[in-house]
Image (cartoon, rainbow, N blue to C red):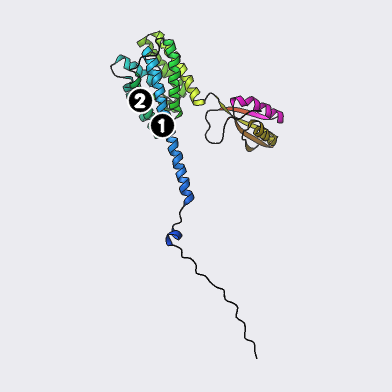
Amino acid sequence: MAEQPSTPPTKETYPTPPVHETEAENPIPVVPAVKKTIAQHRKASFYIKKYVMIFLGAIIASIGLELFLIPNHVIDGGVVGLSIMASTVTPMSFGFFLVVMNLPFLYLGYKQIGKNFAIATLIAICFLSAWSAVFETLPRVTEDPFLAAIFGGIIDGLGVGLIIRAGGSLDGTEIVAIIMDKRSVFSVGEVVMFINLFILSSAGLLFGWDKAMYSLVAYFVISKMIDVVIKGLDESYAVMIVTNEHEAITSALNDRLGRGVTLLHGAGGYTGDSKEVLYCVVTRLEVDKLKEIVLEKDENAFVTINAVHDIVGGRFKKKAIH
Protein backbone atom coordinates (compact mmCIF):
# COMPACT_ATOMS: atom_id res chain seq x y z
CA MET A 1 0.00 0.00 0.00
CA ALA A 2 1.46 3.36 -1.09
CA GLU A 3 2.29 5.99 1.50
CA GLN A 4 0.25 9.15 1.48
CA PRO A 5 2.41 12.25 0.93
CA SER A 6 2.70 14.27 4.07
CA THR A 7 1.42 17.82 3.88
CA PRO A 8 3.61 20.54 5.43
CA PRO A 9 2.19 22.05 8.57
CA THR A 10 0.38 25.31 7.98
CA LYS A 11 1.52 28.40 9.82
CA GLU A 12 -0.94 30.14 11.98
CA THR A 13 -1.64 33.65 10.83
CA TYR A 14 -2.72 36.44 13.12
CA PRO A 15 -4.71 39.44 12.01
CA THR A 16 -2.68 42.60 11.52
CA PRO A 17 -3.86 45.47 13.69
CA PRO A 18 -5.65 48.12 11.62
CA VAL A 19 -3.72 51.25 10.68
CA HIS A 20 -5.62 54.49 10.78
CA GLU A 21 -5.47 56.48 7.59
CA THR A 22 -4.45 59.68 9.35
CA GLU A 23 -1.45 57.93 10.95
CA ALA A 24 -0.29 56.38 7.70
CA GLU A 25 -0.78 59.39 5.49
CA ASN A 26 0.07 62.22 7.90
CA PRO A 27 2.84 61.22 10.31
CA ILE A 28 3.45 63.85 12.99
CA PRO A 29 6.74 65.69 12.26
CA VAL A 30 7.93 65.90 15.83
CA VAL A 31 11.58 66.88 15.26
CA PRO A 32 11.00 69.61 12.61
CA ALA A 33 8.29 71.14 14.79
CA VAL A 34 10.61 71.26 17.79
CA LYS A 35 13.41 72.78 15.71
CA LYS A 36 11.03 75.41 14.35
CA THR A 37 9.86 76.29 17.86
CA ILE A 38 13.44 76.62 19.12
CA ALA A 39 14.33 78.84 16.16
CA GLN A 40 11.31 81.05 16.84
CA HIS A 41 12.23 81.35 20.53
CA ARG A 42 15.81 82.28 19.64
CA LYS A 43 14.62 84.90 17.17
CA ALA A 44 12.21 86.37 19.71
CA SER A 45 14.93 86.40 22.38
CA PHE A 46 17.30 88.16 19.97
CA TYR A 47 14.84 90.96 19.22
CA ILE A 48 13.84 91.37 22.87
CA LYS A 49 17.50 91.73 23.88
CA LYS A 50 18.12 94.11 20.96
CA TYR A 51 15.34 96.55 21.83
CA VAL A 52 15.87 96.35 25.58
CA MET A 53 19.48 97.40 24.93
CA ILE A 54 18.29 100.28 22.73
CA PHE A 55 15.81 101.33 25.44
CA LEU A 56 18.48 101.35 28.16
CA GLY A 57 20.97 103.09 25.87
CA ALA A 58 18.46 105.88 25.17
CA ILE A 59 17.86 106.42 28.90
CA ILE A 60 21.59 106.58 29.67
CA ALA A 61 22.36 108.88 26.73
CA SER A 62 19.55 111.26 27.66
CA ILE A 63 20.91 111.50 31.23
CA GLY A 64 24.35 112.45 29.92
CA LEU A 65 22.88 115.03 27.56
CA GLU A 66 20.18 116.66 29.70
CA LEU A 67 21.88 116.60 33.11
CA PHE A 68 25.45 117.35 32.03
CA LEU A 69 26.09 118.56 28.48
CA ILE A 70 23.11 120.62 27.30
CA PRO A 71 22.70 122.80 30.45
CA ASN A 72 26.40 123.75 30.24
CA HIS A 73 26.27 124.50 26.48
CA VAL A 74 28.60 121.58 25.75
CA ILE A 75 27.56 119.69 22.62
CA ASP A 76 28.18 116.38 20.93
CA GLY A 77 28.93 116.01 17.23
CA GLY A 78 26.59 115.09 14.41
CA VAL A 79 22.83 115.55 14.36
CA VAL A 80 22.74 115.53 18.18
CA GLY A 81 25.00 118.60 18.25
CA LEU A 82 22.94 120.39 15.59
CA SER A 83 19.76 119.59 17.54
CA ILE A 84 21.28 121.02 20.74
CA MET A 85 22.21 124.28 18.98
CA ALA A 86 18.82 124.54 17.26
CA SER A 87 16.96 124.03 20.55
CA THR A 88 19.05 126.81 22.12
CA VAL A 89 18.14 129.47 19.56
CA THR A 90 14.47 128.43 19.14
CA PRO A 91 11.63 127.62 21.55
CA MET A 92 11.40 124.04 20.24
CA SER A 93 12.81 121.15 22.27
CA PHE A 94 15.97 119.14 21.63
CA GLY A 95 13.93 115.97 21.07
CA PHE A 96 11.82 117.62 18.37
CA PHE A 97 14.85 118.67 16.34
CA LEU A 98 16.50 115.27 16.86
CA VAL A 99 13.56 113.51 15.21
CA VAL A 100 13.02 116.06 12.42
CA MET A 101 16.69 116.38 11.43
CA ASN A 102 17.21 112.62 11.35
CA LEU A 103 14.21 111.86 9.09
CA PRO A 104 16.04 112.36 5.75
CA PHE A 105 18.99 110.33 7.05
CA LEU A 106 16.59 107.55 8.09
CA TYR A 107 15.29 107.39 4.54
CA LEU A 108 18.85 107.17 3.19
CA GLY A 109 19.66 104.48 5.77
CA TYR A 110 16.60 102.48 4.74
CA LYS A 111 17.59 102.65 1.06
CA GLN A 112 21.35 102.16 1.43
CA ILE A 113 21.82 99.99 4.55
CA GLY A 114 18.58 98.13 5.21
CA LYS A 115 15.19 98.02 6.89
CA ASN A 116 16.36 96.56 10.21
CA PHE A 117 18.92 99.33 10.68
CA ALA A 118 16.36 102.03 9.85
CA ILE A 119 13.79 100.60 12.28
CA ALA A 120 16.31 100.25 15.11
CA THR A 121 17.56 103.80 14.51
CA LEU A 122 14.03 105.25 14.44
CA ILE A 123 13.14 103.51 17.70
CA ALA A 124 16.39 104.71 19.32
CA ILE A 125 15.72 108.31 18.24
CA CYS A 126 12.13 108.20 19.53
CA PHE A 127 13.26 106.74 22.88
CA LEU A 128 15.98 109.37 23.26
CA SER A 129 13.55 112.18 22.41
CA ALA A 130 11.00 110.93 24.95
CA TRP A 131 13.52 110.50 27.78
CA SER A 132 15.12 113.86 27.01
CA ALA A 133 11.73 115.48 27.62
CA VAL A 134 11.61 113.73 31.00
CA PHE A 135 15.13 114.63 32.16
CA GLU A 136 15.20 118.23 30.89
CA THR A 137 12.97 119.27 33.82
CA LEU A 138 15.59 118.08 36.35
CA PRO A 139 18.41 120.35 37.61
CA ARG A 140 21.87 119.88 36.12
CA VAL A 141 24.36 117.88 38.12
CA THR A 142 27.29 120.32 37.81
CA GLU A 143 27.92 123.85 36.63
CA ASP A 144 31.57 123.17 35.81
CA PRO A 145 31.78 122.74 32.00
CA PHE A 146 34.94 120.63 32.21
CA LEU A 147 33.34 118.15 34.64
CA ALA A 148 30.22 118.18 32.49
CA ALA A 149 32.30 117.38 29.39
CA ILE A 150 34.10 114.48 31.11
CA PHE A 151 31.26 112.82 33.00
CA GLY A 152 28.57 113.76 30.52
CA GLY A 153 30.77 112.34 27.76
CA ILE A 154 31.25 109.08 29.64
CA ILE A 155 27.53 108.65 30.30
CA ASP A 156 26.45 109.73 26.82
CA GLY A 157 29.09 107.51 25.19
CA LEU A 158 27.92 104.53 27.23
CA GLY A 159 24.34 105.02 26.06
CA VAL A 160 25.23 105.61 22.43
CA GLY A 161 27.56 102.59 22.49
CA LEU A 162 24.73 100.34 23.67
CA ILE A 163 22.50 101.60 20.87
CA ILE A 164 25.19 101.05 18.22
CA ARG A 165 25.96 97.59 19.64
CA ALA A 166 22.26 96.74 19.28
CA GLY A 167 22.33 97.70 15.59
CA GLY A 168 20.94 101.25 15.73
CA SER A 169 22.29 104.78 15.57
CA LEU A 170 21.50 108.30 16.76
CA ASP A 171 23.57 110.19 14.24
CA GLY A 172 22.45 110.52 10.64
CA THR A 173 25.83 111.93 9.62
CA GLU A 174 27.28 108.41 9.93
CA ILE A 175 24.87 107.25 7.24
CA VAL A 176 26.03 110.08 4.96
CA ALA A 177 29.64 109.12 5.70
CA ILE A 178 28.99 105.47 4.74
CA ILE A 179 27.37 106.54 1.45
CA MET A 180 30.17 109.03 0.64
CA ASP A 181 32.78 106.38 1.44
CA LYS A 182 31.42 104.31 -1.46
CA ARG A 183 31.39 107.26 -3.87
CA SER A 184 34.50 109.26 -2.94
CA VAL A 185 38.13 108.84 -1.94
CA PHE A 186 37.40 109.81 1.69
CA SER A 187 36.93 107.19 4.41
CA VAL A 188 33.99 107.05 6.83
CA GLY A 189 36.14 108.40 9.66
CA GLU A 190 37.41 111.32 7.56
CA VAL A 191 33.90 112.34 6.50
CA VAL A 192 32.57 112.14 10.08
CA MET A 193 35.55 114.19 11.34
CA PHE A 194 35.01 116.90 8.72
CA ILE A 195 31.29 117.17 9.52
CA ASN A 196 31.93 117.33 13.26
CA LEU A 197 34.66 119.95 12.92
CA PHE A 198 32.15 122.14 11.11
CA ILE A 199 29.52 121.55 13.83
CA LEU A 200 31.94 122.21 16.70
CA SER A 201 33.14 125.39 14.98
CA SER A 202 29.52 126.52 14.76
CA ALA A 203 29.20 125.87 18.49
CA GLY A 204 32.15 128.23 19.05
CA LEU A 205 30.31 131.02 17.21
CA LEU A 206 27.11 130.37 19.17
CA PHE A 207 28.32 129.59 22.71
CA GLY A 208 31.88 130.94 22.71
CA TRP A 209 35.20 129.31 21.86
CA ASP A 210 35.78 128.03 25.39
CA LYS A 211 32.55 126.00 25.14
CA ALA A 212 33.63 124.76 21.73
CA MET A 213 36.86 123.45 23.26
CA TYR A 214 34.92 121.76 26.06
CA SER A 215 32.68 120.25 23.37
CA LEU A 216 35.77 118.88 21.63
CA VAL A 217 36.80 117.23 24.93
CA ALA A 218 33.31 115.79 25.31
CA TYR A 219 33.37 114.50 21.73
CA PHE A 220 36.70 112.76 22.35
CA VAL A 221 35.44 111.15 25.59
CA ILE A 222 32.21 110.03 23.91
CA SER A 223 34.04 108.42 20.99
CA LYS A 224 36.41 106.55 23.32
CA MET A 225 33.55 105.38 25.51
CA ILE A 226 31.69 104.11 22.45
CA ASP A 227 34.77 102.09 21.48
CA VAL A 228 34.92 100.59 24.99
CA VAL A 229 31.28 99.52 24.85
CA ILE A 230 31.50 98.08 21.34
CA LYS A 231 34.87 96.34 21.69
CA GLY A 232 34.80 95.66 25.43
CA LEU A 233 37.36 96.25 28.14
CA ASP A 234 38.67 92.69 27.94
CA GLU A 235 39.57 92.53 24.26
CA SER A 236 39.84 89.21 22.48
CA TYR A 237 42.39 88.21 19.87
CA ALA A 238 42.30 85.73 17.01
CA VAL A 239 45.55 83.79 16.72
CA MET A 240 46.76 81.79 13.71
CA ILE A 241 49.74 79.48 14.22
CA VAL A 242 51.60 77.81 11.34
CA THR A 243 53.56 74.90 12.78
CA ASN A 244 54.82 71.35 12.28
CA GLU A 245 54.07 70.51 15.94
CA HIS A 246 50.32 71.00 15.78
CA GLU A 247 49.44 68.05 18.02
CA ALA A 248 51.71 69.16 20.88
CA ILE A 249 50.59 72.81 20.65
CA THR A 250 46.90 71.87 20.44
CA SER A 251 47.19 69.66 23.51
CA ALA A 252 49.04 72.37 25.46
CA LEU A 253 46.52 75.08 24.55
CA ASN A 254 43.67 72.80 25.59
CA ASP A 255 45.26 71.80 28.89
CA ARG A 256 46.99 75.01 30.00
CA LEU A 257 44.71 77.71 28.56
CA GLY A 258 41.49 75.74 28.31
CA ARG A 259 40.99 76.98 24.75
CA GLY A 260 39.54 75.10 21.83
CA VAL A 261 41.66 75.00 18.69
CA THR A 262 40.56 74.64 15.06
CA LEU A 263 42.94 72.76 12.75
CA LEU A 264 43.30 74.02 9.18
CA HIS A 265 45.27 72.23 6.48
CA GLY A 266 47.59 74.36 4.35
CA ALA A 267 50.72 74.30 2.25
CA GLY A 268 53.73 76.56 1.79
CA GLY A 269 53.34 78.83 -1.22
CA TYR A 270 57.00 78.50 -2.21
CA THR A 271 58.04 75.02 -1.09
CA GLY A 272 54.65 73.34 -1.42
CA ASP A 273 55.28 71.52 1.86
CA SER A 274 52.12 70.68 3.81
CA LYS A 275 51.57 72.78 6.92
CA GLU A 276 49.05 72.68 9.70
CA VAL A 277 47.49 75.99 10.73
CA LEU A 278 45.92 76.34 14.18
CA TYR A 279 43.20 78.92 14.82
CA CYS A 280 42.39 79.99 18.37
CA VAL A 281 40.71 82.94 20.13
CA VAL A 282 42.12 84.17 23.46
CA THR A 283 41.72 87.18 25.74
CA ARG A 284 44.25 90.00 26.05
CA LEU A 285 45.59 88.53 29.30
CA GLU A 286 46.24 85.16 27.64
CA VAL A 287 48.27 86.40 24.65
CA ASP A 288 51.66 86.30 26.37
CA LYS A 289 50.99 82.85 27.81
CA LEU A 290 49.98 81.59 24.37
CA LYS A 291 53.24 82.88 22.85
CA GLU A 292 55.17 81.14 25.60
CA ILE A 293 53.37 77.83 24.98
CA VAL A 294 53.83 77.97 21.20
CA LEU A 295 57.53 78.83 21.27
CA GLU A 296 58.09 76.19 23.94
CA LYS A 297 56.70 73.51 21.63
CA ASP A 298 57.97 74.86 18.29
CA GLU A 299 60.49 77.70 18.18
CA ASN A 300 60.10 77.90 14.39
CA ALA A 301 56.33 78.44 14.52
CA PHE A 302 54.85 81.43 12.67
CA VAL A 303 52.20 83.29 14.70
CA THR A 304 49.86 86.13 13.72
CA ILE A 305 47.58 87.91 16.22
CA ASN A 306 44.61 90.12 15.31
CA ALA A 307 42.09 91.96 17.47
CA VAL A 308 38.53 90.57 17.50
CA HIS A 309 35.68 93.06 17.96
CA ASP A 310 32.92 90.56 18.73
CA ILE A 311 32.34 86.84 19.22
CA VAL A 312 29.07 85.09 18.34
CA GLY A 313 28.36 81.48 19.22
CA GLY A 314 30.77 78.83 20.42
CA ARG A 315 31.74 78.35 24.04
CA PHE A 316 34.24 81.16 24.49
CA LYS A 317 34.64 81.90 28.20
CA LYS A 318 37.37 83.07 30.53
CA LYS A 319 39.60 80.22 31.70
CA ALA A 320 42.20 79.86 34.41
CA ILE A 321 45.79 80.15 33.13
CA HIS A 322 48.44 77.76 34.39
| Residue type, label 1 | Tyr
For label 2, count other residues whose C-alpha is less than 10 Å away and answer few (under 14), some (14-19) or many (20+): many
| Residue range corresponding to the magenta coloring | 282-303
Please give left or right for residue 304 compared with residue 161 in the image: right
* Magenta stretch holds residue 294: yes
Instruction: Please tell me in which quadrant of the rendered image residue 237 appears.
Output: top right
Please give left or right for residue 303 compared with residue 13 in the image: right
Q: Position of residue 17 (x, y in %)?
A: 48, 65
Between residue 100 and residue 314, name the one nearer to us: 314
Please give left or right for residue 236 compared with residue 204 in the image: right
Between residue 313 and residue 276, name the one nearer to us: 313
Q: Position of residue 216 (x, y in %)?
A: 44, 14
* Magenta stretch holds residue 49: no
| Labels 2 and 1: the sequence-earlier one | 1
Quickly name the residue at label 2.
102
Instruction: Please tell me in which quadrant of the rendered image residue 193 appears.
Output: top left
| Residue type, label 2 | Asn
Q: Residue at x 36, y 10 (%)?
A: 207
Quadrant (top left, top right, bottom left, bottom right) of the C terminus: top right
For label 1, count other residues whose C-alpha is less than 10 Å away and answer few (under 14), some (14-19) or many (20+): some
**Residue 128 showing in the rendered view:** yes
- Image height check: is 64 above or below 116? above
